[in-house]
Image: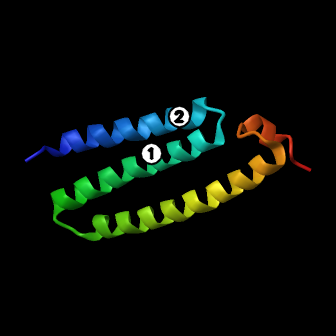
Amino acid sequence: MVPLNWYIVLSTAVFTIGVIGFLMRRNVIIILMSIELMLNGVNINLIAFSHYLQDPRGQILTFFIITVAAAEAAIGLAIIIALFRNKATAHVDDIHEMQG
């Protein structure tokens, strides 16, 4: 059986990669993928603790997080496609110029 510490290290690494990608990249699609990585890091942590404590609540919460992440990805991509049609770019700085 894999120890709990390995799952915590894995989820921390995935979450950290997501945070770095969110803070460093300027492409909106990469930012959305980084948010998904952060959510998956949290999901790994929830499932590991749920399995370790023999409590299914963490696994149930993970299903809700996956559902919200799918809706967020669909809505986010629809917004990005609409902005790309108007501005012909997917960079955050150029989208910021569209205010007001």
Q: Residue at x 44, y 51 (%)?
A: 39
Q: Which residue is mark 1?
A: 37
- Residue 24, x across and y down, in percent: 59, 29
Q: Is residue 64 above or below residue 16?
A: below
Q: Is residue 25 above or below residue 4?
A: above
Residue at horizontal 45%, vertical 67%? 67
Q: Amino acid at mark 1?
A: Leu
Residue 27 placement: quadrant: top right
Along the polypeptide, which appears first: circle 2 or circle 1? 2
Question: Quick one: label 2, few (<14), some, or many (20+) residues within 10 Å?
Answer: many
Left or right placement of residue 19 versus residue 5 in this view:
right
Work out how far the residue at label 2 is from the one at label 1, CA to CA, in angstroms.
9 Å
* Front in this rendered view, residue 83 or 99: 83
Identify the residue under disc 2.
Answer: 21
Q: Are marks 2 and 1 in contact (CB under 8 Å)?
A: yes
Give residue 22's position: percent from left, percent from top: 57, 38
Per the image, label 2 sits on a secondary structure element best described as: helix
Q: Is residue 31 left or right of residue 19?
A: right
- Left or right of 100: which side holds 17? left
- Residue at screen point 23% across, 61% down: 50
Question: Callout 1: helix, strand or loop?
Answer: helix
**Residue type at mark 2?**
Gly
Residue 4 in the image, given as x and y percentages of width and height: 18, 46
Q: Viewed as shown, does residue 20 lie left or right of 66?
A: right
